[in-house]
Amino acid sequence: MLANITSGAVLGIEAYRVDVEVDLGRGMMTFSVVGLPAGAVCESRTRVKSALDNCGYGFPQRRVTVNLAPGHIRKQGTAFDLPIALGILAADGKIPPDALEDTLVVGELSLDGRVRAVRGVLPLAAHAARLGARRILVPADNGGEAAVVEGLDVRAVDHLVEAVEALAEGQSLPVASPPPDEPPELDCPLDMTDVRGQGQARRALEIAAAGGHNLLFIGPPGAGKTMLARRLPTIVPPMNFAERLDCSTIASISGLLRPDAPLVCHRPFRAPHHSVSDAALIGGGPQARPGEVSLAHHGVLFLDELPEFRRNALESLRQPLEDGEVVVARAQATLCYPARFMLVASMNPCPCGYHGHPRQACECHPIAVRTYRNRISGPLLDRFDLHVGVDPVDPAALHFAPPGEASSVIRDRVLQARARQRTRLEDTGLACNAHMRSREIAAHCALDDTSRRLLMTAMERLALSARAHDRILKVARTIADLADSPRITTGHIAEAIQYRQLDRAEP
Ligand SMILES: [Zn+2]
């Protein structure tokens, strides 16, 4: 009386196969689950028993042993409910033993037998396809994300009875349909046309979007720093399918995919509050979930009021900013999550916010101003490519200022600049100028003598690091791309240097 159902689990973003073996033996009625079950898996016994009883199948009056193999990997989550229930019914002769051949099964059961959505179905479906499974059986609310995977027969059910009746009578299970190929237009009520004035900040935002550069806005409260940052998603280039799949996988294991939108269509824009914990920002914690830096993968991580974030949390951003991924150490395994994002942040120039303001007096002691700015370490500050002062807006001027250029116009220029980068970086697999490594910088950021002298002088005068040097070259490359210039000119490098000057100003 043995049955074997194929299921799967996700650890980090890696999926692996789990075999659910069910044995009905002689003896008193018992129900045990072995194979390193943890947390919710231990509780699945209660859910499975109730669901079988409430659906009228009854629980076998036998010794029921469920083995989750391989035994050395810790099993978490609720996805084994459905395969365990179907395994018991198969072992009990209520569904044909071969009805679920070549099929990977996942799903949580409610006590009345409804099949509930689980996390991580997209990476599981992709893994099932790689394993050569013919079919995957998933909860109805996960059907869309599983159907994104090509070459896999995706079946989705929303009740245990529905699955059992179809399997018992040899009928086909409901087919899940994939989401439409073309992503919908970004539905965003914001537009760059709402931003009046702010010429330099608008320009910096365009450069950042065009080259994928990190950007820091510094200015008094109410100057429009947040307003500008929140409009970044309206001018960034769209994601390609591989990028959408990456983002969807992270959203899937985080439980953030909606049944009606199973594929992430637009670049993420994450704006965690400054009280965010290290684990929530970087990833980890007891469940080893991806953090905000991974949820922002291929998109934007916006940190409003940067000095208010805890210093530890900010310092932990340095590794993902450098490597494009985050490593979370756990007792059992080391997990690696992708985390290549654009970092955009805003800060006041001083605690009261009015340092350098033309009409309001700053009440801060110079030492308080210095302490405030020192909350952001030099190495982190170094990783912002563009440091931009956002000036307070003169209310009178605002009234007469014409509306700003529309997002669609800016986005066209950004797209053209990205297309030039894509052609240039085609063989490297890199998406944009910000991702260039030393090799690509040497190949694509050659300077003439005048430009080189200008950069050397700036390095000395502003005491810039080698990292800042490379970042200036990358920004200059993007400025040249926006101007459709094959070479970086002295004007381009001068503008790139100008975005490095702000934080050196003494309080
Ligand atoms: Zn102040």
Image: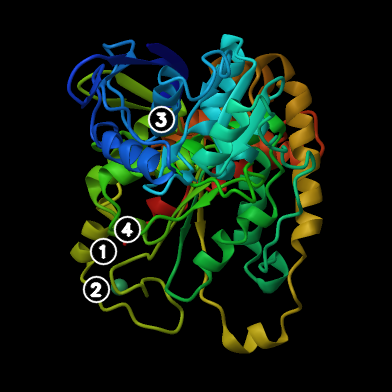
| Alpha carbon separation for disc pair 2 and 1 | 6 Å
Position of 153 with respect to 120 (left or right) is right
Q: Position of residue 43 (x, y in %)?
A: 25, 37
> Which callout, 2 or 1, points at the residue further toward the start of the chain?
2
Can you tell which quarter of the image residue 365 is in?
A: bottom left
| Alpha carbon separation for disc pair 4 and 2 | 22 Å
Residue topped by disc 3: 85
What amino acid is found at the position of numbered circle 1 in the picture?
A: Val
Give the label, 3 or 2, closer to the camera: 3
> Is the residue marked 2 within 8 Å of ligand 1, measured from its CB?
yes
Which is more toward the observer, 73 or 49?
Answer: 49
| Alpha carbon separation for disc pair 1 and 3 | 63 Å
> Which callout, 4 or 3, points at the residue further toward the start of the chain?
3
* Element carrying mark 3: helix
What amino acid is found at the position of numbered circle 4 in the picture?
A: His
Give ligand 1's quarter of the image: bottom left
